[in-house]
Image: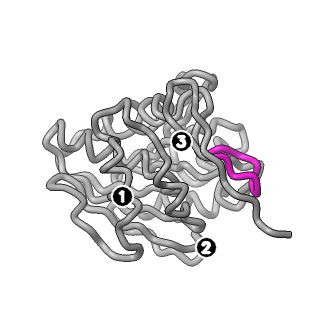
Amino acid sequence: MDKQQKTIIYTDDGSTTIFNPNIGEHYHSTHGALQESLHVFLMHGLAKIRCNEINIFEMGLGTGLNFLLSAAFAKQHNLMITYAGLDKYPIENDIAETLNFSAHPGTDQGRVEKFHQLTWNEWHNFSANARLLKTIGDIQDFTFPTGIDLVYWDAFSPAVQPELWTEQIFSRIYHSMRSGGLLTTYCSRVVVQKALRASGFKVEKHPGPPGKREILNAIKV
């Protein structure tokens, strides 16, 4: 069967997401792509890290929204982020060019296009406050960077990618993180909580963004 074309969807806050018909899921919440990322990954992630040089890993680079918001936050707060992201199925250029997150000053169209035009599998100085490595590959073959302070776990849901939400994967992440490091994710399913705890994390539940009751923080203790 031929793969179906991904489509752009406008979410409730006016920002865009992508629907992947081959997986049957959206890349961001249809209740608001921008507000979901700000809530889950910025407010309950980057804003909680108390150091000036921060190593971030993202599972599921997708549209680049989480990175772009993080780079803008780093500039605003005079931080330096080193950001490594992994994606097995990068978004096609013609789809990337139609993304719209312009309601936020750090995610204007120029920055969105710059993110997607950068070459894969090599480091780039995206800005004075952000270094970026976009890696194409399968997590089973991926070597996590060491000394990670913050993890954005933004893979597709356990319903469609259960292999990315296992104790085995989370244990590998745990051992790559610094003590006190934080993993944040939109998914609060019981199976995910159990896998995180079995890996050694302390798990906290927090109120979610519109359309989601709870999200998770997992701390390396």
In screen coordinates, is 140 left or right of 109?
A: right
Q: Nearer the viewer, residue 122 or 216?
A: 122
Q: Position of residue 93 (x, y in %)?
A: 50, 63
Q: Considering the numbered disc 2 on the image, is that residue within a helix, a strand or a loop? A: helix
Task: Return the residue at label 3.
Answer: 185
* Residue 168 to residue 199: above or below: below
Is 117 covered by the magenta stretch?
no
Q: Earlier in the sequence, mark 2 or mark 3?
A: 2
In screen coordinates, is 81 left or right of 193?
A: left
Which dot, 3 or 1, sits closer to the camera? 1
- Residue 30 seen anywhere in this rendered image of the structure: yes
- Residue 178 seen anywhere in this rendered image of the structure: no
Instruction: Look at 28% across and 34% down and name the residue there.
Output: 105
Disc 3 and disc 1 in contact, CB within 8 angstroms: no
Is 21 covered by the magenta stretch?
yes
Task: Return the residue at label 2.
Answer: 140
How far apart are the two marked residues, 2 and 1, measured between alpha carbons? 25 Å
Number of marks present in the image shown: 3
Label 2 neighbour load within 10 Å: few <14, some 14-19, many 20+: few
Read off the magenta span.
Answer: 19-26
Task: Return the residue at label 1.
Answer: 115
How far apart are the two marked residues, 3 and 1, measured between alpha carbons? 22 Å
Q: Position of residue 73 (x, y in %)?
A: 26, 39
How far apart are the two marked residues, 2 and 3, measured between alpha carbons? 20 Å
Type of residue at label 2? Gln
